[in-house]
Image (tube, helix red, strand yellow):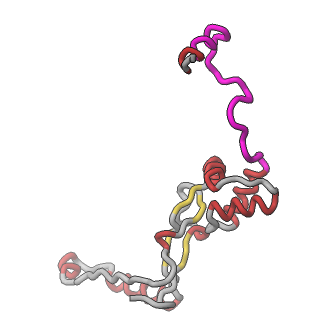
Amino acid sequence: MPSAMCNLWKQFQDTGSIERKPGQGRPIATTVTEDCYLSIIARCNRGATASQLSRDLYAVTGICVSRVTVYKRLHETGLFARRPAVCVPLTSTNRRGRLAWCREHRDWSMDQWATVLFTDESRFSLNTDFCHTFIWREPGTHYLPSNVREIDHNGGVGV
């Protein structure tokens, strides 16, 4: 049985090249139009999973593709599944209070700051786990408003 190296050597001697012939290999499961559709629905619904996007594509086109294929097609268009940036929404009162505090303390000396005790005010929420929630986004767009998820400051149960 000839090896891959023998086949490559024979092909090189015959054609002067080791390039693959067009049409060889597994056919691509989706068309360019279907790839574009996947990209559009992933951008519109950034929180959708690859499995959900695969089902959406099937519902519209009748083409059944795996979630891995969806990942690959979205990666080709520059979309990657990443954790969203998380923030606590600030009210206008919160913003004014924070600005006033900053203005009061902007001229403090190092000695004054040395007397301040900083604490870690961690809060544990029993609501949605943002560590396991992903969105589809382009590299370098972590803090765009469409990629930031607001969390309930006091809503729901917390410890």
For the C terminus, the image quarter is bottom left
| The one of 59 and 38 positioned closer to us in this rendering | 59
The one nearer the camera, 1 or 157, is 1
Most common secondary structure along the magenta stretch: loop
In the rendered image, residue 19 lying in the magenta stretch gets the answer yes
User: Closest to the observer: 88 or 132?
Assistant: 132
Quarter residue 66 falls in:
bottom right
**Residue found farthest to the right:** 61
Q: Is residue 50 above or below residue 16?
A: below
Q: Could you tell me residue 82's position as x and y percent?
A: 53, 61
Dividing the picture into quarters, in which one does residue 123 lie?
Answer: bottom left
Report how many numbered discs are placed on residues in the image: 0
Q: Residue furthest top?
A: 13
Give residue 132's position: percent from left, percent from top. 49, 69
For image coordinates 57% across by 17% down, the residue present is 1
Name the residue furthest front. 1
Query: How far across and how far down the image is residue 44, in percent?
Result: 70, 66
What is the x, y in percent for residue 26?
A: 69, 36
Residue at 51% across, 79% down: 128
Q: Which residues are magenta?
A: 8-33
Q: Magenta span has 44?
A: no
At horizontal 78% and vertical 53% (from top left) the residue drawn is 63
